Image: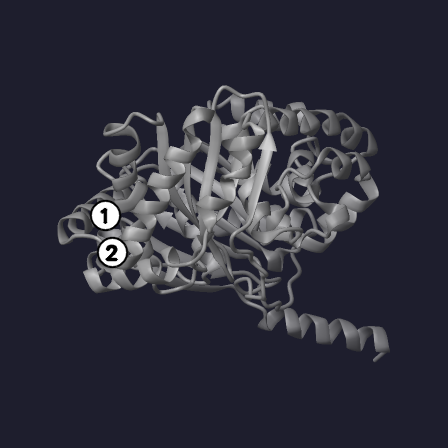
Amino acid sequence: MTSRGLKATARTSSEARAVARTQTLIKGAGGIGTVRKTTLPGGLRVVTETLPSVRSATFGIWAHVGSRDETPALNGATHYLEHLLFKGTSRRSALDISSALDAVGGEMNAFTAKEYTCYYARVLDTDLPLAIDVVCDMLTGSLILEEDVDVERGAILEEIAMTEDDPGDCVHDLFAHTMFGDNALGRPVLGTVDTVNALTADRIRRFYRKHYDPTHLVVACAGNVDHQKVVRQVRAAFEKAGALTRTEATPIGPRAGRRVIRTAGRVELLARKTEQAHVVLGMPGLARTDDRRWALGVLNTALGGGMSSRLFQEVREKRGLAYSVYSYTSGFADCGLFGVYAGCRPSQVHDVLKICRDELDHVAQNGLSDDEIARAIGQLRGSTVLGLEDTGALMNRIGKSELCWGDQMSVDDMLARIEAVTPDDVRSVAQDILGQRPSLSIIGPLKDKQASRLHDAVA
């Protein structure tokens, strides 16, 4: 037998051992809400949630890449690539991609975050095979032509300009920079005008080949779907493109933590001629894997998560100092942020900051009342369930869970974790998070005398 024959025999034997592995991760009653996962040879994971009572389905592909995977010179490459995958493949033009979903009344879009990217389509259940074929074609067969890169550059620069024209949005990018500095987490997802102008088709293609390997992808599908049919259709689409090997490959695990330098007591002011001053006062939060995140969620809800929250009542209802005021948390693989946002007249900035700082300090030292905690738990439980009432939200949940945690949690388990939060849990996490020295980001037309007093808010 020739050496070529020996290699062929060994490859055939290896392929015979490489089989798809299917698991039931969450067993729903009567099959409703059942979550299944199949890992294909080549490392591609397919996760579905079955809901026979609906007539829609949402199909998405999650990529284990975000803006924190970029070097300073590549800042914006992940988002740029997201745009380019809609520009055409060897099988479809950009018009073919958009018209295919429009013709069946479907919706198709994508989003880029700091640690992942997602491409998705929502369609009638009968049109799911079309959605699978189109989205898989985009992910595996994108051409990334020089002319498309040049055309899309203009659209992305306009998107950057649009964001900068919205200071209520832009201030959160500024806060990330205030907290993380010139770290990948501190740079904007969209990139900057300079970095976007410097990106070339060749550099983006290399980025695409590095980060869109099947071992880096998770396919998620929710709605009136049959798991095995989805797996067969996805496998056929990837194999047609030559993007899925028949040999075993290990999927990449959840993102590992690494040391992130965060600052305290830092103030950044971006002078803009706006009618309002846009303020974010905040401090380091928790990583998304931290078990205390459930208590932090209750704390966040009670502090600034609704109309009955402390900040809303103190800043808006009692004093009328702001129309929009809220708190929020952001969790990453190894760190997190807690922030309080308010938009107010420039002349009221110091009053708003003092009230917010006083409330944060008071809760850090004294905790919340039992009534506040009970109300926050009820609000959080209700919003969790109501936020999962469509197939798009369900697809997001199972896809992100597989990519970021490597497992699934049922809605009942989530509700139980929220319900189990005690006043002591909330008091402890309030001391740990709110007891830290905050940092401050502001966009607005503050005068020199006002600006000179900003450090008082973080002292």
Q: Does the rendering let one see residue 224?
A: no
- Image quadrant where residue 409 sits: bottom left
Q: Secondary structure at mark 1?
A: helix
Badge 2 crowding class, 10 Å Cα cut-off, few under 14, some 14 to 19, many 20 or more, is many
Please provide percent x and percent y for residue 259: 58, 66
Instruction: Give the spatial CA distance, label 2 vs label 1.
Output: 7 Å
Q: Secondary structure at mark 2?
A: helix
In the figure, is residue 167 to the left or right of 340? right
Asked whether the beta carbons under mark 2 and mark 1 sit within 8 Å of each other, the answer is yes
Q: Give the residue at mark 1.
A: 381
Q: Residue at x 57, y 64 (%)?
A: 251
Q: Residue at x 52, y 55 (%)?
A: 264
Amino acid type assigned to the residue bearing label 2 in the image: Ile
In the figure, is residue 289 to the left or right of 150? left
Amino acid type assigned to the residue bearing label 1 in the image: Arg
Q: Which circle's residue, 2 or 1, is located before the other in the chain?
A: 1
Say which mark, if any, is on residue 418.
Answer: 2
* Residue sticking out furthest to the right: 2
Please provide percent x and percent y for residue 73: 77, 47
Q: Residue at x 37, y 34 (%)?
A: 351
In the figure, is residue 3 to the left or right of 135? right
Q: Residue at x 37, y 49 (%)?
A: 49
Q: Nearer the viewer, residue 86 or 300?
A: 300
Q: Nearer the viewer, residue 277 or 179?
A: 277
